[in-house]
């Protein structure tokens, strides 16, 4: 997977991101990257905000799912794999011996689905079927068009009351950077991939910009109802739901919320059948109730470890690790590595500073990937002086077993003193002058390790 692909993935999992031109083009829109929660957690938040959701229970074992069936007392039950990815309905649960690549082709609609393969969302009618459905999912990996062929482990299922669907609608909300405010998006084309609707018939998506101080106004609620074709009592129920949905988004500093499908039942009720919620991780400090919902098993372990020490880390697929300070420098460093024929394995941004502890932890995270064949340190010493950075690098070098070549390029305040420290240190550190030299040296060093 190339960098473009990877950055694409960063904004992809949340469908609505791609509806907003500006956010889709911004790879550092962290709110779309980190802090996703499961459907069952999102539904609990929705319910608390006054949005109608089907009743349900979470199960970790097939037997628990079967017991939940009894408690739900309903003729139709839906068993749903809980993973941080959409497209579960068309997804496939696989075991370790199954062909992941073939399953991915099926989940993406490129190959026909054979009979009998377990979908990520299953409608069942009896206690025994519920147990079977849960057993076909729990402990397996779910592969959907959003997970890639490796899939995501299913450790929980949601057992929920099934509803008869009269209409499937779409309701979403995201921050529109061009409009400088959140926007509610509604469409009558629910249940399908909303990206497709946005691409093929954008006029079918109603957009309502929201003033964060006012929330959803009455007339805006009516506008959404009208766009969705809701009438009479159903429209009233819809407007109550829209209000709660918008309030939840604003109160919890969500970055993206999607109800797909939002359904109208035969009896005229409006319900959120599915929900995805992402949060702005920069605002998580004021939402401890949301922060505890993080499921570490769903995150890239290195990215999580970096986030915990205040570092920004992104895993990629190449073999050159990059330690930089600043997102712009990270981008240009990766461009240069690629320009000179290399592939970045990851990048780690230590931000404005580069303390000894940060550099140490940064190296540990970078070197934790077995793909890494060389490391490039590219740091601009502005406020932080280059000789101090060089000293921190030397301490880190001695504390960590550097199994691969290390190339360092420093620029900025006290650069001569910093470079002299590295050169005179007697360590096997390759010093580079300028970005091009650094990129060429690290690409050559990585090639030399193969
Ligand atoms: P996703 O595929 O990951 O987006 O999962 P969803 O929760 O959206 O479920 C996928 C599809 O399963 C929905 O679009 C519905 O068509 C179907 N589905 C889910 N729940 C129900 C239900 O209660 N009743 C019926 N009839 N279909 C359901
Ligand atoms: Mn859905």
Image (tube, rainbow, N blue to C red):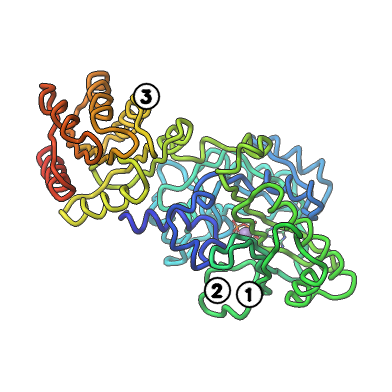
The residue sitting at 21% across, 38% down in the picture is: 410
Q: Which residue is mark 1?
A: 205
The x, y position of residue 289, in whole percent, is 69, 36
Query: Which residue does the numbered mark 3 point to in the structure image?
Result: 357
16 and 260: which is toward the camera: 16
Q: Position of residue 408 (x, y in %)?
A: 19, 36
CB under 8 Å between callouts 1 and 2?
yes
Q: Earlier in the sequence, mark 1 or mark 3?
A: 1
Label 1: few (<14), some or many (≥20) within 10 Å? Answer: many
On screen, residue 53 versus residue 398, left or right, reads right
Q: Residue at x 61, y 81 (%)?
A: 203
Horizontal side of residue 65 vs 338, given as left or right: right
Real-space Cα separation, disc 1 to disc 2, in angstroms: 7 Å
Would you place residue 154 above or below residue 99 in this image?
above
Q: Quadrant of residue 180?
A: bottom right
State the CA–CA distance, disc 2 to disc 3.
46 Å
Residue occupied by mark 2: 198
**Which of 378 and 369 lies nearest the eye of the viewer?**
378
Task: Give the Cα separation between the discs numbered 1 and 3.
Answer: 49 Å
* Comes first in the chain, label 1 or label 2: 2
Closer to us: 251 or 112: 251
Label 3 element class: helix
């Amino acid at each position: 997977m190339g960098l473009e692909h990877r950055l694409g993935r960063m904004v992809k999992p949340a469908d609505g991101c791609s509806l907003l031109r500006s956010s889709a083009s911004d790879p550092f829109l962290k709110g779309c990257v980190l802090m996703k929660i499961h459907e069952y957690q999102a539904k609990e938040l929705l319910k608390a905000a006054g949005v109608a959701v089907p009743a349900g229970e979470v199960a970790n074992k097939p037997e628990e799912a079967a017991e939940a069936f009894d408690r739900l007392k309903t003729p139709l039950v839906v068993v749903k794999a809980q993973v941080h990815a959409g497209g579960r309905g068309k997804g496939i649960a696989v075991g370790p011996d199954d062909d992941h690549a073939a399953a991915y082709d099926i989940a993406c609609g490129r190959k026909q689905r054979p009979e009998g393969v377990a979908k990520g969302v299953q409608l069942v009618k009896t206690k025994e079927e519920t147990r079977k459905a849960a057993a076909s999912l729990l402990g397996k990996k779910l592969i959907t068009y959003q997970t890639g062929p490796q899939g995501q482990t299913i450790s929980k299922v949601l057992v929920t009351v099934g509803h008869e669907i009269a209409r499937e609608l779409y309701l979403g909300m995201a921050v529109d950077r061009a409009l400088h405010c959140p926007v509610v998006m509604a469409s009558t084309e629910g249940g399908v991939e909303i990206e497709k609707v946005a691409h093929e018939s954008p006029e079918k998506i109603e957009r309502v910009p929201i003033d964060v101080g006012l929330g959803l106004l009455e007339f805006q609620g009516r506008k959404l109802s009208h766009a969705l074709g809701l009438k009479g009592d159903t429209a009233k129920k819809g407007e109550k739901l829209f209000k709660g949905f918008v309030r939840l988004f604003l109160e919890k500093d969500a970055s993206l919320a999607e109800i797909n499908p939002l359904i109208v039942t035969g009896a005229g009720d409006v319900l959120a059948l599915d929900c995805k919620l992402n949060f702005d991780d920069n605002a998580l400090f004021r939402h401890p109730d949301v922060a505890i919902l993080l499921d570490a098993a769903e995150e890239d372990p290195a990215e999580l470890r970096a986030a915990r020490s205040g570092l920004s880390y992104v895993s990629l697929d190449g073999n050159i690790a990059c330690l930089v300070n600043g997102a712009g420098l990270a981008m240009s460093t990766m461009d240069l590595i690629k320009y000179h024929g290399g592939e970045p394995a990851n990048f780690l941004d230590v931000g404005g500073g580069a303390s000894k502890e940060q550099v140490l932890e940064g190296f540990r995270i970078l070197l934790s990937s077995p793909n890494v064949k060389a490391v490039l340190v590219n740091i601009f010493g502005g406020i932080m002086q280059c000789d101090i950075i060089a000293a921190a690098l030397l301490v880190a070098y001695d504390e960590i077993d550097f199994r691969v070549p290390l190339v360092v390029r420093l620029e900025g305040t006290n650069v001569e003193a910093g470079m002299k420290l590295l050169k005179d240190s007697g360590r096997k550190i390759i010093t580079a002058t300028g970005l091009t030299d650094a990129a060429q040296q690290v690409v050559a060093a990585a090639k030399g390790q193969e």
